[in-house]
C-alpha cells in the first residue's frame, strides 16, 4: 500500500472530531442501501433507503484525487463535482456504492483527502442515479466531514468474472441478477475459453472517447467506459496520461479490471459496463492487428476522369509484421472491389499507396476503406468500423455544395470531406448574436445553409486568422467561403477559413423544417432520421413543456438551461436549450423561467447536437410564438406587501411575464390596456393565495406600441405600469 501523507491523515482525524454531531443519523451498511430482494426484475426499483440521510462505512476503491496532497487533479470528471467508489468489507454482495460531492469547492467534508485501502464513514442522502445508487454527501447547512475509521494493507481485491456471466442461460439476454455486483470492483481475465477481444473503439472529442467494447467471439460483450481521466483520449478533458493509446480494434487483451456499472443504450439496449479507474486496470494486448493511420487521398475534391492517389501507413503490432494492404471500394452502392496497395521502400516501408483510375460519370459516390493484414493472420481496417463509417467522396463536374459536405448515409456523422479543404456557398441562418452560447464548450456559433432540405446547413468554426470575421457575419449574409472540414462535438463544421467573401446582405433565410418532437426525441448523434437536419432551422408545433429542467439532479442543484418539450402528437419528448440563444428565456436571474405545463404555438430554432443530445436552440424571441403560462404560485419566500413588478422582458416581442406579490389571499385581476385606455386582455380574474405569482402575456395578435397593465387585489391595492411591444 502506498504510504499516506501524514498531513492528509492528520486533517482527516481533525475533521473527524466534528463527527459526533451525526450520532442521531442512522448508521447503515452499503448492502442496506443497495439490496433489492427481487434482483432479477427487468425494471430496477430504487434503493429502499432512497431520499434518506444516513451514515455508511466503506473501504475506498477509488480516491477522488490522483494524490490527496501532492497531485490534486481529479480522477473522475464530473464538472465541478468529486466522486469516489467504496465497497463493504469482505467483498460482500450489494456493497458497491458511488459517493458524490456536488461541488469540489465546498470545504469541510475532507472528501478530497480520502485514500484507497482506508475505511471511512460518510454521511449523505441516498440517491437514485440511472441504474445505480449513490450517496450525495451532506454539505448544507453545514458540511459533515468524512471520518477515518481504519486503514488496510490494500484496496479491495477485484472479483473474478467472465463475459458470459453477464448473460442469461440463453447466451443473449441481459442478466439482471448481476445487479448484486453493481458498483463493485471486478476483473475479467483472458483464457482460451474466454478471450477478451476489443472492438468499437470510440474516437473523437466526446466524453466517452477512449472507450471500447470487449467481446469473446461468442456474442457476449461488455462496454469499457472511459470515465476515469487515466483512460480518456479527448483533448477537451483533463487527461492524466497523454501518452495513453487504447488498444486497436481486434486486439486480444490479457485482462480488464474496474467498477461494474450498467446502462440502457439507445442502440444496444441494456448492457453491462466496466469502468477501469487506475492505469494497471487494463492489461497489455497479447495480440493486436495492424495499426493503420494517415489514410489520405489526392485530390480531396475529385472531378470526373481524375485519377486519385490513395496513401496509408500500416504498422504491425505485438511482434507481428504487415503482410499486405488493400484499398476496398464501392462505387454508387455497387459490389465491393479492391486494389492492392504498394509498399514503400527504405524509410517508407510502412507506407502504402495505390492509384485509382478516374471515373467518368458525374455525381458518382465512392466509398472506401483500407484493410491491412499481418503475420498473425489478424486484420484491421481504417476507419475502424468500416461497416458503418467508410471514407467517401463525390465525383463532381460542378461546384461542391454544403449538401455534399454534410452527406453521411451510414449514420456515422462522418463527412466525405473530413480534413479536406472545400469551397461552398450559402446564407447565414443564425449569427453569433442569435446564438451567443454560454460557456467554453458551448461557444457563440454561426450557421450557413444552402437552401432548404436535408444536409443543407452547417456550422462554421472560428479557428484560424478569419475566425473573428466569422463572428461578425449577420443573418441574411450570402457568403462564399473556403475552409477545412472537421468533425467535432456539434457535428461536421467548416473551420480554419482561408477565404470569406460576403456576396450580399439581407437575403431571406430558408424555410424552417417542421418536425415532431418524437422525430428527434433522445436520439444519438448520427441517427439518420435526425442527422440530415442537424444545423438546420427546425420548427416544433403545439409544444408543451413537460420537464422544466432537463438536467435536474436528485439534489435539484443542476440547471444547464434546458427543458424537455413534447408536441400535440404525444410522441417522445426532446430538448430545447434556452441558455445558448438570445431570447427572453435565456438563463439568469431576470430571464423568463418556463414551468411544466407552459405552452407555445410553435418553437423555431437551430437543431444542434451538444453534450450527447440533439436539442433545439431558439435564436430570438420571434422564434417563440404563442407562449402561454398558467398563473402559478412560485413559492419563493413569503410576500410581506403588495407589489407589482416591471414586466420582463421590456420592451418585448411577442411575449412577456408579469410578476406580483400578495401578502394575503385576495380576489385578483390583472388586465392589459392600450394607449387609449381601452381594455385589450384580462389575464387573471380569480381568488389567489398569498405569495409570489406570475402570469405570461402573449401579444402576438397586437400591434407594436405602448400598453399598460394593472393589478387589483380586492379593494386594498391597485397599481398600473407601462410596457412596450416592439415587433
Image (cartoon, rainbow, N blue to C red):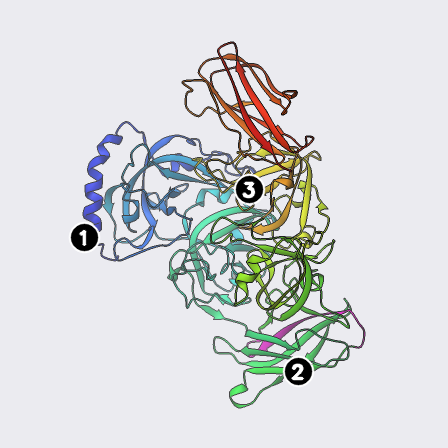
Name the image quarter holding residue 594: top right
Q: Nearer the viewer, residue 360 or 421?
A: 421
Residue found 22% across the figure and 50% down from its top: 8
The stretch in magenta equals 360-377
- Is the residue marked by circle 1 packed among few (<14), some (14-19), or many (20+) residues within 10 Å? few
C-alpha distance separating marks 1 and 3: 48 Å
- The residue under label 2 is 354
Residue found 71% across the figure and 47% down from its top: 512
- Is the residue marked by circle 3 packed among few (<14), some (14-19), or many (20+) residues within 10 Å? many
- The residue under label 1 is 6
The disc placed on residue 578 is: 3
Q: Residue furthest front?
A: 676
The location of residue 645, given as percent across then percent down, is 49, 26
C-alpha distance separating marks 2 and 3: 50 Å
The location of residue 186, given as percent across then percent down, is 42, 52
Find numbered disc 1 in the image and state the secondary structure of the residue it sits on: helix
Amino acid at each position: 500500500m502506498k504510504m499516506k501523507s501524514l498531513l492528509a491523515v492528520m486533517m482527516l482525524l481533525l475533521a473527524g472530531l466534528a463527527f459526533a454531531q451525526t450520532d442521531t443519523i442512522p448508521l447503515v451498511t452499503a448492502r442496506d442501501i443497495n439490496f433489492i430482494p427481487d434482483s432479477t426484475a427487468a425494471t430496477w426499483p430504487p434503493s429502499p433507503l432512497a431520499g434518506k440521510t444516513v451514515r455508511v462505512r466503506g473501504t475506498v476503491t477509488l480516491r477522488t484525487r490522483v494524490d490527496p496532497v501532492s497531485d490534486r487533479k481529479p480522477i473522475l470528471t464530473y464538472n465541478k463535482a468529486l466522486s469516489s467508489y467504496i465497497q463493504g468489507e469482505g467483498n460482500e454482495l450489494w456493497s458497491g456504492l458511488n459517493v458524490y460531492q456536488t461541488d469540489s469547492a465546498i470545504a469541510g467534508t475532507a472528501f478530497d483527502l480520502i485514500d484507497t485501502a482506508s475505511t471511512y464513514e460518510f454521511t449523505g442522502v441516498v440517491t437514485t442515479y440511472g441504474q445505480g445508487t449513490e450517496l450525495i454527501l451532506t454539505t448544507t447547512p453545514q458540511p459533515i466531514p468524512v471520518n477515518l475509521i481504519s486503514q488496510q494493507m490494500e484496496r479491495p481485491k477485484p472479483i473474478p468474472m467472465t463475459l458470459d456471466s453477464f448473460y442469461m442461460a440463453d447466451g443473449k439476454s441481459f442478466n439482471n441478477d448481476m445487479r448484486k455486483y453493481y458498483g463493485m470492483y471486478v476483473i475479467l481475465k483472458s483464457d482460451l475459453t474466454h478471450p477478451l477481444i476489443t472492438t468499437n473503439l470510440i474516437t473523437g472529442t466526446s466524453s466517452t472517447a477512449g472507450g471500447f467494447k470487449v467481446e469473446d467471439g461468442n456474442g457476449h460483450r461488455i462496454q469499457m467506459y472511459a470515465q476515469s481521466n487515466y483512460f480518456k483520449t479527448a483533448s477537451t478533458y483533463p487527461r492524466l496520461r497523454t501518452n495513453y493509446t487504447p488498444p486497436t480494434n481486434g486486439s486480444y487483451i490479457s485482462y480488464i479490471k474496474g467498477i461494474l456499472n450498467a446502462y440502457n443504450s439507445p442502440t444496444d439496449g441494456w448492457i453491462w459496463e466496466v469502468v477501469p479507474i487506475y492505469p494497471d486496470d487494463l492489461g497489455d494486448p497479447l495480440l493486436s492487428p495492424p495499426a493503420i493511420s494517415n489514410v489520405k487521398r489526392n485530390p480531396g475534391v475529385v472531378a470526373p476522369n481524375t485519377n486519385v492517389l490513395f496513401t496509408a501507413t500500416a504498422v504491425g503490432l505485438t511482434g507481428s509484421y504487415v503482410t499486405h494492404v488493400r484499398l476496398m471500394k464501392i462505387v454508387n452502392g455497387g459490389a465491393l472491389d479492391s486494389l492492392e496497395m504498394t509498399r514503400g521502400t527504405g524509410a517508407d516501408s510502412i507506407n502504402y499507396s495505390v492509384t485509382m483510375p478516374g471515373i467518368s460519370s458525374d455525381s458518382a459516390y465512392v466509398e472506401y476503406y483500407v484493410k491491412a493484414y499481418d503475420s498473425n493472420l489478424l486484420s484491421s481496417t481504417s476507419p475502424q468500423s468500416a461497416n458503418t463509417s467508410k471514407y467517401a467522396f463525390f465525383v463532381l463536374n460542378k461546384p461542391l455544395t454544403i449538401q455534399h459536405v454534410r452527406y453521411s448515409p451510414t449514420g456515422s456523422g462522418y463527412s466525405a470531406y473530413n480534413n479536406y479543404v472545400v469551397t461552398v456557398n450559402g446564407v447565414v441562418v443564425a449569427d453569433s448574436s442569435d446564438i451567443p452560447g454560454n460557456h467554453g464548450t458551448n461557444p457563440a456559433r454561426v450557421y450557413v445553409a444552402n437552401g432548404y432540405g436535408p444536409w443543407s446547413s452547417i456550422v462554421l468554426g472560428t479557428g484560424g486568422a478569419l475566425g473573428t470575421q466569422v463572428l461578425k457575419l449577420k443573418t441574411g449574409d450570402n457568403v462564399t467561403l473556403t475552409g477545412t472540414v472537421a468533425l467535432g462535438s456539434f457535428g461536421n463544421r467548416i473551420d480554419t477559413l482561408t477565404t470569406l467573401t460576403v456576396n450580399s446582405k439581407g437575403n431571406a433565410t430558408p424555410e424552417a423544417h417542421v418536425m415532431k418532437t418524437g422525430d428527434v426525441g433522445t436520439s444519438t448523434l448520427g441517427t439518420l432520421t435526425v442527422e440530415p437536419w442537424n444545423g438546420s432551422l427546425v420548427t416544433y408545433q403545439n409544444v408543451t413543456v413537460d420537464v422544466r429542467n432537463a438536467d435536474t439532479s436528485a439534489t435539484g442543484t443542476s440547471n444547464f438551461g434546458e427543458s424537455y418539450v413534447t408536441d400535440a402528437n404525444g410522441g417522445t419528448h426532446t430538448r430545447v436549450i434556452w441558455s445558448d440563444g438570445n431570447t427572453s428565456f435565456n438563463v439568469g436571474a431576470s430571464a423568463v423561467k418556463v414551468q411544466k405545463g407552459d405552452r407555445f404555438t410553435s418553437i423555431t430554432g437551430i437543431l444542434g447536437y451538444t453534450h450527447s443530445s440533439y436539442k433545439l436552440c431558439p435564436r430570438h424571441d420571434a422564434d417563440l410564438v404563442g407562449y402561454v403560462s398558467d398563473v402559478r404560485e412560485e413559492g419563493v419566500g413569503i410576500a410581506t406587501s403588495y407589489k407589482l413588478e416591471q414586466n420582463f422582458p421590456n420592451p418585448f416581442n411577442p411575449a412577456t411575464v408579469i410578476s406580483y406579490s400578495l401578502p394575503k389571499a385576495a380576489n385578483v385581476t390583472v388586465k392589459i390596456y392600450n394607449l387609449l385606455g381601452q381594455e385589450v386582455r384580462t389575464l387573471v380574474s380569480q381568488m389567489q393565495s398569498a405569495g409570489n405569482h406570475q402570469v405570461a402575456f402573449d401579444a402576438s395578435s397586437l400591434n407594436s406600441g405602448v400598453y399598460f397593465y394593472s393589478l387589483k387585489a380586492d379593494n386594498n391595492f391597485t397599481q398600473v405600469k407601462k410596457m412596450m411591444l416592439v415587433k
